[in-house]
Amino acid sequence: MKKREQLEQLQILTADVYKEAILEMRETGDYNAAILNGSRQFLKDNDIISVTEQGSPLGNLAEVLPFEASDDDKEAMRQSN
């Protein structure tokens, strides 16, 4: 397996782990700030500012985060697409 493929696989696994952890937190209502912050930083590091590809591992992670974007943020996201 090439290095790029290994990194892509690691990225997918990381996104899946964050997604599952956040879904579990949503079920219990007990949120872990470190996991939420880690997932936020993971999205930021991967330049995910709005979800344009639903169904992708990173898009799925972004969809489960329990944050509401402000109207200004939503407008900025629309303008950046």
Image (tube, rainbow, N blue to C red):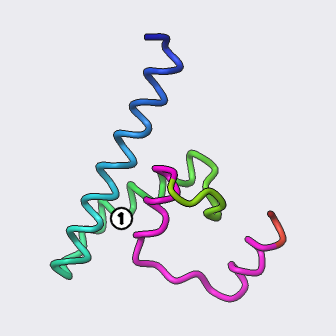
Quadrant position of residue 6: top left
Residue 67 position, x and y percent, is: 46, 78
Q: Position of residue 76 (x, y in %)?
A: 77, 74
Q: Tag 1, which secondary structure?
A: helix
Residue 35: x %, y % from top left: 30, 59
Task: Report the predominant secondary structure element of the magenta stretch.
Answer: helix
Q: Position of residue 17 (x, y in %)?
A: 29, 49
**Which part of the image, by quadrant, shows the N terminus?**
top left
Vertical order, 47 against 63 (above or below): above
Residue stretch in magenta: 56-78
Residue at the extreme top: 1
Is 73 included in the stretch rendered in magenta?
Answer: yes
Q: Residue 60 lies in what quarter of the image? A: bottom left
Quadrant for the C terminus in the image: bottom right
Instruction: Give the residue furthest to the front.
Output: 55
Residue 14's quadrant in the figure?
top left
> In front: 74, or 55?
55
Left or right of 76 in this view: 39? left
Residue extending farthest bottom: 71
Residue shown at 64% from the left, 50% from the top: 47
Nearest the camera: 75 or 33? 75
The single residue placed furthest to the right in the displayed view is: 79
- Badge 1 crowding class, 10 Å Cα cut-off, few under 14, some 14 to 19, many 20 or more, is some
Q: Is residue 5 above or below residue 37?
A: above
Left or right position of 69 against 39: right
| 55 relative position to 21: left or right | right
Residue that mark 1 sits on: 36
Q: Amino acid at mark 1?
A: Leu
Q: Residue at x 22, y 71 (%)?
A: 25
